[in-house]
Image (spheres, grey):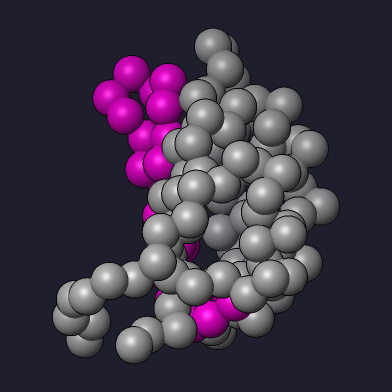
């Protein structure tokens, strides 16, 4: 069984704030790329009209996710000035510490059942 933690966060981008949102996200991506070798995937997707975004992440384990939160959480106030979290889905078996950090987002948790990871 994998110790990976996978996320799907959905955000509603505030009207007229897409460029500001993208600027913050680009900074977060740079910080993640440079400082987090155990963040295995960190991918942002925006719909055609720029009103909705999905963030898909894969972390080696709960510890890697906690490192990520420590690295980028200081930017959340700015990010959430331009977007609202509408859904937080967490896949895998997060540690109690990670769950405590994610619970305020209204996170839904899904335990791994079966599958193939390469």
Is residue 102 toward the left or the right of residue 86 in the image?
Answer: right
Do we see residue 34 in this rendering?
no
Residue 90 spot, x, y in % from top left: 47, 57
Do we see residue 25 in this rendering?
yes
Residue 118 found in image quarter: bottom left
**Is residue 4 or residue 100 the one in the foreground?**
100
Give the magenta range. Answer: 39-62
Residue 111 spot, x, y in % from top left: 40, 66
Is residue 45 toward the left or the right of residue 108 in the image?
Answer: left
Is residue 5 toward the left or the right of residue 28 in the image?
Answer: left
Position of 112 relative to 77 (above/below): below
Residue 41 on the magenta span: yes
Position of 35 relative to 13 (above/below): below
Residue 24 spot, x, y in % from top left: 64, 42
Q: Residue at position x 41%, y 27% from top?
A: 52
Residue 2 found in image quarter: bottom left
Position of 74 relative to 37 (above/below): above
Q: Residue at position x 77%, y 67% from top?
A: 70
Instruction: Kindly give the residue lying farthest to the left in the view shown.
Output: 116
Residue 88 spot, x, y in % from top left: 51, 44
**Is residue 53 or residue 29 the one in the foreground?**
53
Q: Residue at position x 63%, y 75% from top?
A: 95
What secondary structure is the stretch in magenta mostly built from?
strand
The number of discs equals 0
Q: Residue at position x 44%, y 78% from top?
A: 4
Is residue 1 toward the left or the right of residue 3 in the image?
Answer: left
Image quarter in which the N terminus is found: bottom left
Residue 33 on the magenta span: no
């Amino acid at each position: 069984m994998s110790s990976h933690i996978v996320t799907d966060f959905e955000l509603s981008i505030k009207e007229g704030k897409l460029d500001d949102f993208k600027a913050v996200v680009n900074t977060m991506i740079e910080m993640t790329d440079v400082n987090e070798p155990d963040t295995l995937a960190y991918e942002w997707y925006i719909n055609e009209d720029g009103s909705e975004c999905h963030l898909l992440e894969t972390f080696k384990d709960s510890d890697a996710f906690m490192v990520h939160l420590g690295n980028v959480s200081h930017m959340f106030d700015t990010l959430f000035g331009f977007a609202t979290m509408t859904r937080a889905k967490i896949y895998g078996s997060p540690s109690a510490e990670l769950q405590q950090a994610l619970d305020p987002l209204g996170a839904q948790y899904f335990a791994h059942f079966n599958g193939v990871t390469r």
